[in-house]
Amino acid sequence: MNHPPHNPGVRDLIANKRQFSHRQTAAEGKLGFRGWHERGRLPHFDVPGRTQFVTFRLADGFSESRRSEWEHLAKIENDEERRELLEEYLDRGHGDACLKQPFVGGMIEKALRFFDGERYELRAWVVMPNHVHVLFKVGDVAMADILESWKSFTAKEANKLLGRTGRFWQPDYWDTFMRNGEHEAQIRGYIESNPAKAKLVRDRKEWPWCSARLRDE
């Protein structure tokens, strides 16, 4: 197992969200958007026009050999607290952490930026050693399709570059939609401070695969 365990309460959560929150329209469905949905472990909210914060990680980010270190984190009931602590665990760089290889990290950043302004609008990003954070505004292409495109292309390219085969990314991803401009600014700061917070660099602009280096303060 390379992921936190199945979340038995997520189906009830999604049913409640569908009833009392956003109601999926036929037009959204035709474009591939699924509104509130789940894939067994995590809730997802996929609608046009939303700015989303997503995290996806390497397949060995939560390895079976280190289960005792992360298992209790995955059982925390509060979604925000659970995600924060799991991401802190990822920041320790466990697993292969091959994204720190310049030829891999650079390739992934290039893939994220390739359709910026066409399929989506990038707001911030960082490629960490074993996971990726992206803040972007969804347009007419569903968030799930954007993530699938990023992960499918970069997995094939990375395996080629590394001379390996097999699963590269963990199947699912975390997403959080931005409530307002203040929330977005907070998340942008979190993303761009991640390398310094993880003690990979002293200054956020020193990390080579991060939007911070392109931003005027």
Image: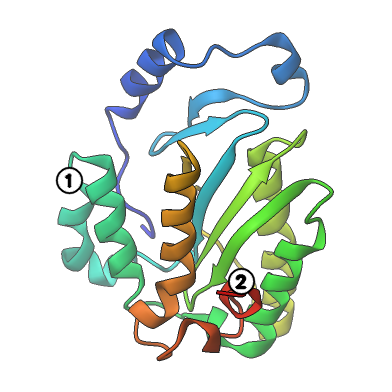
How many numbered markers are drawn? 2
* Residue 22 place in picture, x, y as percent: 51, 16
The image quarter containing residue 76 is top left
Say the numbered circle drawn on residue 76: 1
Query: Is residue 214 rendered to the left or right of residue 202?
Result: right
> Mark 2 Cα within 10 Å, few/some/many (few <14, many 20+)?
many
Query: Is residue 3 rendered to the left or right of residue 31?
Result: left
* Residue 153 place in picture, x, y as percent: 75, 61
**Above or below, comparing residue 86 to residue 102 in the picture:** above
Residue, disc 2: 211
**Above or below, comparing residue 2 to residue 145 in the picture:** below
Residue drawn at (62%, 28%), measured in percent from left and top?
47
Say the numbered circle drawn on residue 153: none
Q: Is residue 171 visible?
A: no
Image quadrant holding the N terminus, namely: bottom left
Disc 2 from disc 1: Cα separation: 31 Å
